[in-house]
Amino acid sequence: MWFPFVGITLIIIGLLYFGGINKEAESVAGQIIMMTVAGLIYGYGCTIQVNCVFDNSAPQLIHTTVYNKWIEHSKSVHYHFKLNSWDSDQKLKNIEVSESTYNRYTNGDNININLKKGALHIPWFTVSN
């Protein structure tokens, strides 16, 4: 993920710098810092979007189980599953799901995951309905 992220971020920072720097302002360094922060944020978002939107790989169906589920109340309500691992990394996977998906499953239920390779070779997945 790092190579595409850094590349996209540098392109965005370059475009912001050459298209928007005000050299007559008092704080050129402040502008550069803000452009770098904006570039990092947009670079991350663009990397994820490009990886998922342009991914034409066939999904691999993975079978796993819901280890645990919980609801988080912060600025809004978030529904989470903790899934048993399906790869060599044996850590449980935390994912956020929709309310309808949350209500469909209970602890210990089997759940199907569609795993895709990613256009930038960054694996990603969705819950299969």
Image (cartoon, helix red, strand yellow):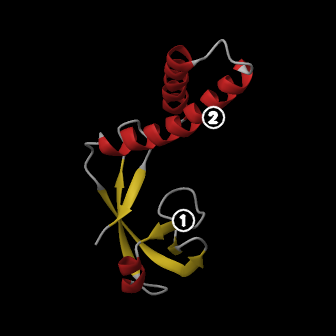
- Name the residue at 66% across, 23% down: 32
Vertical comparison of 70 with 14: above or below: below
Q: Position of residue 84 (x, y in %)?
A: 52, 71
55 left or right of 89 in image: left
Q: Residues within 10 Å of mark 1 (few under 14, many from 20)?
A: some
Q: Position of residue 114 (x, y in %)?
A: 33, 60
74 left or right of 49 in image: right
Vertical comparison of 55 with 24: above or below: below
Secondary structure beneath dot 1 equals strand
Q: CA distance from mark 2 to mark 1?
A: 29 Å
The residue type indicated by label 2 comes to Val
Vertical comparison of 72 with 54: above or below: below
- Name the residue at 50% across, 66% down: 95
Question: Which callout, 2 or 1, points to the residue nearer the camera?
Answer: 2
Q: Residues within 10 Å of mark 2 (few under 14, many from 20)?
A: some
Q: Quickly name the residue at label 2.
A: 37
- Name the residue at 55% across, 67% down: 94
The residue type indicated by label 1 comes to Lys
- Name the residue at 40% across, 35% down: 120
Secondary structure beneath dot 2 equals helix
Residue 93 - label: 1
User: In this orientation, which residue lies closer to the viewer: 46 or 21?
Assistant: 21
Q: Earlier in the sequence, mark 2 or mark 1?
A: 2
